[in-house]
Image: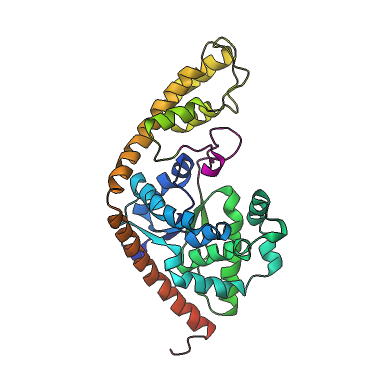
Amino acid sequence: MTAFSKKIILTGDRPTGKLHLGHYVGSLANRVKLQDEYQQFIIIADMQALTDNAENPEKVRDNIIEVALDYLAAGIDPERSTIFIQSLVPELAELTMYFMNLVTLARAERNPTVKDEMKQKGFGADVPMGFLAYPISQAADILAFKANLVPVGNDQEPMIEQTNEIAEKFNRIYAPIFPEVKSLISETPRLIGTDGKAKMSKSLGNAILLSDNDDAIAKKVTDMYTDPNHIRVSDPGTVKGNVVFTYLDLFDPDKAEIKKLKERYREGGLGDVVLKKRLTEILRSIIGPMRERRNELAKDPDAIRKILKEGTERARATTAATLHDVRNAMKIDYFG
């Protein structure tokens, strides 16, 4: 199967920090599998990161290499996946502007994902226009590559819905340029943070990073939320909501043993220390090889920049072809 006959995937991350275990189970591991079956473009979305980090651009700049290192360490191959920097593909900004004319303010404000994130960040009426409009930018990212599939969580379905609305409106007004985009829903549930209160996030201090050393992993597992009423080893414990068991369900390959451990924990006679030691060793076995690859790759930052530069050039070639079609359809190809 040639690259040109494969279906196209667009996926990526905002460079606001090093990637963590939630990113790995939620998307990175899947991207490694998908890169053989699909033509995969992976965007480092620095412009979207600036929508709520405009006063701290250094944070975004510094994390571009960090995110790229995490990608490569996790097994993403730049020969099979195109990794690129959003702001260095100006066609994406141009297409965003054209799409903004197809979306009303009321529709932009109605996007449930944006509404939830505005509430979380406490913007109120002071929401930056870039943040309000970022789903339009996401639609441009997806459609500029004429992507067929976008891996998303259930909470991101509104983004795909709005992308298809924009594509349908453009195709109806101008010409049938864009395909319908379908969601590729991950079967892995969103990984909760080590505190058990929210999704894993570096900003919330409840994340295990893919670059964490063995001591950091052990410390974070030791601090994990379990059952506050399970004070003594002999006390019966609760499995539901116990973060250690949540992680063991995801990462421990011995499902039969986990079932037995849950039964013992519920009955009493199994301490948290034993469970946390087991989980620590499992997470070290997963993260350790990635961390070692990452540390080796980090010794040559010029090689990482070269990968990003070449990927960005490939991305520009693809989006330039799309924008040629777009301008022609809109009758704004003034000089042919």
Q: Which residues are magenta?
A: 186-208
Residue 32 percent across, percent down from the top left: 37, 48
Residue at (46, 78) in percent of width and height: 325
Quadrant hosting residue 88: bottom left
Image quadrant containing the N terminus: bottom left
Horizontal relation, residue 69 to residue 322: left or right = left
Residue at (63, 54) in percent of width and height: 113
Image quadrant containing the C terminus: bottom left
Q: Is residue 1 visible?
A: no
- Which residue is more in the foreground, 164 or 138? 138
Quadrant hosting residue 160: bottom right
Q: Is residue 96 above or below residue 161?
A: below
Main SS class of the magenta portion in the image:
loop
Residue 194 in magenta stretch: yes
Residue at (33, 64) in percent of width and height: 309
Residue at (49, 41) in percent of width and height: 22
Residue 291 in magenta stretch: no
Q: Is residue 148 above or below residue 207?
A: below
Residue 40 percent across, percent down from the top left: 39, 58
Residue 246 percent across, percent down from the top left: 53, 30
Q: Is residue 316 visible?
A: yes
